Amino acid sequence: CYVIRAVFGDGNKITPTIHWCRKPNGSQGWVLYHQPEPRILYNLNLIVSNPSAQIVIVEGEKAVDAGNQTIKNPAKVIFTCWSGGTNAPEKTDFGPLKNRSCVIIPDNDKPGEKAADTVTALLTAAGVQSIKRIKPPAGLPKGWDIADKQWESAAELLAWCRDNVASIAEPAPDMPENIPPADPSEYDMAADYSELPAPEHKDNDQVKSVLAKHAVGDTVLADAPFRILGY
């Protein structure tokens, strides 16, 4: 599963999801389609294989990649997100975060705050160990996220998080104290997908042929700059 992130000259963007599927006629190829529900967390393989890492939840794959590329230490900190944007957190399975320490960094706007409220409730229901929520400081542009800043180092990003913690939520009083961690076997990431022709950042005819059907006004997505963000 991949998300194609395309940004147009007027600032608008679209983020369709593509899957490698076997079609009714028996052929195989990339198709535009949402993840089936419940959807998986972005970077689930890292989450499962690093059970002691702190989890940082942001809005959108672009911000996840920015965070992980800055920290570069998945044994300690892993950035992730749900699939589908501000209106779809409840469609993702947060079960793999059971008994984990979690931090939420919302986008700097009302939809981002609302999504963070929903994620907080979903994390509590999943049985996480603790939840810290970051409040983007005053003066940042509307819609700002961590991908909009060029971080000098992992230390700078982590210090920014510590300085902007707005609230800390411990597990609810009626929640069991010793919730067993998620069983990695429930989230098997060992399947071999190495033979699939993974989409590329440039010149992938299969991807472009799918995206060419997804027109926005007079603009054809396949002719716009796009990034491949893989689940």
Image (cartoon, rainbow, N blue to C red):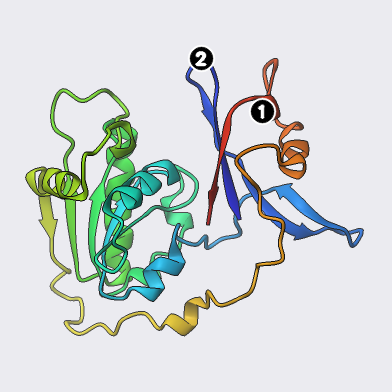
Reply above or below: 127 against 42.
below
Disc assigned to residue 130: none
Reply above or below: 63 against 90.
above
Reply above or below: 137 against 200.
above
Secondary element type, mark 1: helix
* Left or right of 50 on screen, residue 201: right
- Marks 2 and 1 in Cβ contact (< 8 Å): no
Dot 1 amino acid type: Leu
The x and y percentages for residue 160 are 13, 43
* Left or right of 93 on screen, residue 29: right
Examine the image and state in which quarter residue 192 appears.
bottom right
Dot 2 amino acid type: Asp
Whether residue 86 is visible, yes or no, is no
Structural crowding at the residue carrying mark 2, measured as other residues with C-alpha within 10 Å and reported as few (<14), some (14–19) or many (≥20): few
Q: How many marks?
A: 2
According to the image, label 2 marks what residue? 10
Whether residue 207 is visible, yes or no, is yes
Structural crowding at the residue carrying mark 1, measured as other residues with C-alpha within 10 Å and reported as few (<14), some (14–19) or many (≥20): many
The x and y percentages for residue 166 are 11, 45
x 43%, y 81%: residue:
184
Reply above or below: 27 against 63.
below
Q: Which of marks 2 and 1 is nearer the N terminus?
A: 2
The x and y percentages for residue 195 are 71, 66
Q: Distance between the residues labelled 2 and 1?
A: 13 Å
x 32%, y 29%: residue:
143
x 59%, y 50%: residue:
2
- Residue furthest to the left: 163
x 52%, y 63%: residue:
38
Secondary element type, mark 2: loop
Identify which residue, 72 or 66, lies in the foreground: 72
Quarter of the image where the N terminus is located: bottom right
According to the image, label 1 marks what residue? 221
